[in-house]
Amino acid sequence: MTSINRRGLLAGLGALGAGACSDLHKNETAQDAFRTAEEWHRAGHRMLAGRERLAPEYAPHERSPDIRGNGSLTVDSPFYREQSASGFPAWRLAVSGLVRTPLSLSLEDIRALPQRTQITRHDCVEGWSAIAEWRGPQLGSVLDAAGLAPEANFIVFRCADELYGRAYYESIDLVDAYHPQTIIAHELNGAPLPEKNGAPLRMRIERHLGYKHAKYLTAIEAVASLDDIGAGKGGFWEDLAGYQWYAGI
């Protein structure tokens, strides 16, 4: 996507987030138009960029001084506060759903897997960007360890945080799940993830806008369909505010 198109997409979605979507998401005609545009966006993006093409990566000196927290800045629960204060010794990442071998991974397990380090740009739907270094195992390697069933089509990310009384979640298809830069990040700029950025685990899906990069990750679920999850739109902001499910950039 060219920089002009990227800015246009960010500006358009940002305007929705400012309030226009609160009415549009209730209008079926508008939603049909959005779905058609989204399918075109996904097909066009993958045709032009290729399924495996990498998002740009940067040199260490190009990292931003800080990457701001956005959305939830913490998890409001006694368990999270206790875990955060002690380095998350009891935090587990469940891998379940349409898999042959369900997994329950500790942070030690996550750190023991082969790691990928990448310096990439985070693009927020609100229009700001930041360059940072992320480290963690590739999601594809975790899915391979669990063994996806043939009927699995989507990967759902469950999170510990809530916004507006709803649990945050997101999802992607298998093309993005197996992209080389899709990682389960536990480090930011060479240190454990800060609380505001999703400690102890968050997704990095580098060819997508920031709302797809689920924070405070607790579970990964392989499913055949998104229809019965949340409101059936594939993610928190997709359900609540009509954001595109495919947010490729």
Image (cartoon, rainbow, N blue to C red):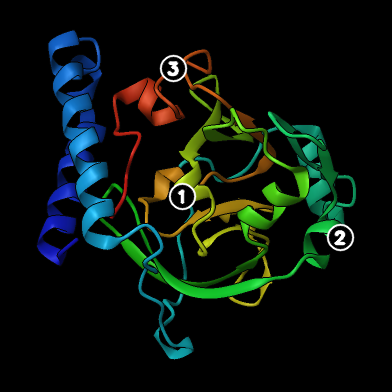
Circle on res. 232: 3
Mark 3 crowdedness (10 Å alpha carbons): few <14, some 14-19, many ≥20: few
Marks 3 and 1: CB-CB under 8 Å?
A: no
Vertical order, 96 against 43 (above or below)? above
Amino acid type, label 2: Glu
Is residue 38 found left or right of 110 in the rendered image?
left
Q: CA distance from mark 2 to mark 1?
A: 25 Å
Nearest to the observer: residue 90 or residue 103 = 103
Q: CA distance from mark 3 to mark 1?
A: 19 Å
Circle on res. 108: 2
The quadrant in which the C terminus is found is bottom left
Is residue 148 found left or right of 53 in the rendered image?
right
Number of marks in the rendered image: 3
Q: Residue at x 62, y 43 (%)?
A: 74
Query: Which of the marked residues, 3 or 1, is nearer the chain's N terminus?
Result: 1
**Element class at badge 3:** loop
Amino acid type, label 1: Asp
Mark 2 crowdedness (10 Å alpha carbons): few <14, some 14-19, many ≥20: few
Query: Which of the marked residues, 2 or 3, is nearer the chain's N terminus?
Result: 2
Measured as percent of width and height from the top left, residue 215 is found at: 58, 46
Q: Circle 1 sits on which residue?
A: 176
Mark 1 crowdedness (10 Å alpha carbons): few <14, some 14-19, many ≥20: many
